[in-house]
Image (cartoon, rainbow, N blue to C red):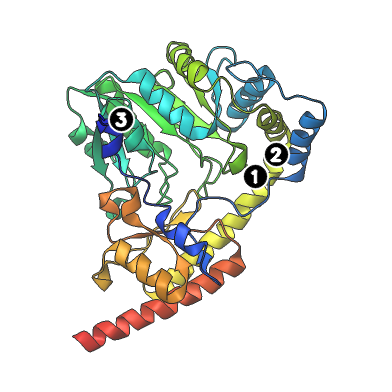
């Protein structure tokens, strides 16, 4: 029998995030600080709207682009929050999560051999999606000394004559890094000079703790070069509803629409009705969740200072990225021992790119009570490692 598998898919590595959580799910008294999922329930008024849509029998397909009312509310939200103005008829597609939007944007924009610059550490899907789109991923390693921000010089150095797309993953998963307006203005000059396009994943836009998030699409000359991706999972605690969206110039969205139409048909109808309610009346929910995340963030920054673990202060998303190089173990070895000895699951930094070696991703999308227990165990583990190092000297 001939090999039924594509060479391309066989060469793609599975996600490095799930390994530890398959173990922790069967480990009594274990705490997981790894999954990027809010510990909040979807607010009741949003759930109620989803329930009501089912009670009213709204179980039909929607327009392939998504409910018109939802696309209108997306445009109102972007205008209200970020002064970004899109045509809901021609420049917005409602997708099955932000992940589908990333995939179809790349498949729409890439010709075989085009290069896609992917700053890492970053979300695990970018590189596989680029490969599946027949692109050549060009990995740009972000640096802790720059607070894991992308600099104009780093971008300039990565560009070749085949470069077409930059993926911009800020606020960043896993580091919590952000890009402020001055950072974006500097890289925008490079992007325009080299005639590039940007896929800007802004799923954590509402979880910014240093002023309001700035989108690169707000920078003059960039809206026409940007596919803006966002969704409902993180801001509104709607992970299981699987709903996102992409906004871009019509010449891009009308081609993304073809892939979405043939592969997906439309996003879940119930989720779309719930999302309308989220955008209309959910600002207060977002603010309350952001305040609690910020409280947890400040607790962890202080805890790592007390513990003596180097860690820059994250200003976005709900992750912190401490450095564990002093223990002379790989990130995977540290995370494995921590799980086995203290029953706490964290994610090795290498799950988000090779330059994540020597770091851990810890999510604070968990209750402060659980965080305090887990950090107590980490402090005990670190003290034990340091004592062992002292004996070995």
Q: Position of residue 327 (x, y in %)?
A: 27, 72
Q: Could you tell me how many numbered marks the image carries?
A: 3
Vertical relation: 389 (above or below) 310: below
Q: Can you identify the residue that label 1 sits on?
A: 286
Mark nearer the viewer, 3 or 2: 3
In this view of the protein, can residue 264 be seen by the observer?
Answer: yes
Q: Which quarter of the figure is the C terminus placed in? A: bottom left
Q: Residues within 10 Å of mark 2 (few under 14, many from 20)?
A: some
Residue placed furthest toward the bottom:
391
Vertical relation: 64 (above or below) 316: above
Q: Secondary structure at mark 2?
A: loop
* Mark sitting earlier along the chain (3/2): 3
Q: Can you identify the residue that label 3 sits on?
A: 4
Mark nearer the viewer, 1 or 3: 3
Q: Secondary structure at mark 3?
A: loop
- Picture residue at 68% right of the left edge, 40% below the top: 283
Q: Can you identify the residue that label 2 sits on?
A: 282
- Which residue is at the front of the view, 171 or 130? 130
Dots 3, 2 in contact, CB < 8 A: no
State the separation of the CA atoms marked 2 and 1: 6 Å
State the separation of the CA atoms marked 1 and 3: 46 Å
């Amino acid at each position: 029998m001939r090999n039924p598998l594509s060479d391309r898919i066989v060469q793609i590595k599975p996600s490095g995030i799930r390994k530890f959580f398959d173990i922790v799910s069967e480990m009594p008294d274990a705490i997981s600080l790894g999954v990027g999922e809010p510990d909040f329930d979807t607010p009741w008024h949003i759930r109620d709207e989803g329930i009501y849509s089912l009670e009213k029998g709204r179980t039909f397909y929607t327009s392939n682009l998504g409910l018109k009312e939802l696309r209108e509310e997306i445009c109102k939200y972007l205008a209200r929050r970020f002064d970004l103005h899109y045509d809901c008829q021609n420049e917005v597609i409602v997708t099955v999560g932000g992940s589908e939007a990333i995939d179809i944007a790349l498949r729409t924009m890439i010709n075989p051999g085009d290069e896609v610059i992917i700053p890492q550490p970053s979300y695990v899907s970018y590189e596989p999606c680029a490969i599946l789109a027949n692109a050549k991923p060009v990995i740009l390693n972000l640096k802790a000394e720059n607070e894991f921000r992308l600099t104009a010089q780093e971008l300039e150095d990565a560009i070749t004559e085949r470069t077409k797309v930059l993926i911009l993953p800020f606020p960043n998963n896993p580091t919590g890094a952000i890009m402020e307006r001055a950072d974006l203005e500097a890289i925008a000059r490079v992007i325009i000079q080299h005639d590039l396009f940007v896929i800007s994943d802004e799923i954590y836009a509402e979880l910014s703790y240093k002023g309001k998030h700035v989108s690169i699409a707000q920078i003059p000359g960039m809206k026409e070069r940007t596919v803006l991706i966002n969704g409902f999972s993180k801001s509104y605690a709607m992970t299981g509803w699987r709903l996102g969206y992409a906004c871009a110039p019509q010449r891009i969205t009308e081609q993304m629409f073809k892939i979405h139409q043939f592969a997906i048909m439309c996003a879940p109808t119930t989720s779309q009705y719930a999302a309308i309610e989220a955008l209309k009346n959910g600002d207060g929910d977002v603010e309350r969740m952001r305040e609690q995340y910020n409280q947890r963030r400040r607790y962890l920054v202080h805890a790592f200072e007390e513990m003596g673990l180097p860690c820059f202060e994250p200003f976005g998303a709900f992750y912190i990225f401490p450095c564990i190089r002093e223990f002379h173990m790989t990130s995977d070895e540290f995370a494995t021992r921590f799980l086995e000895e203290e029953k706490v699951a964290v994610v090795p930094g290498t799950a988000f790119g090779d330059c994540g070696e020597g770091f851990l991703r810890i999510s604070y999308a968990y209750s402060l009570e659980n965080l305090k227990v887990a950090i107590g165990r980490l402090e005990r583990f670190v003290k034990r490692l340091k004592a062992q190092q002292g004996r070995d000297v």
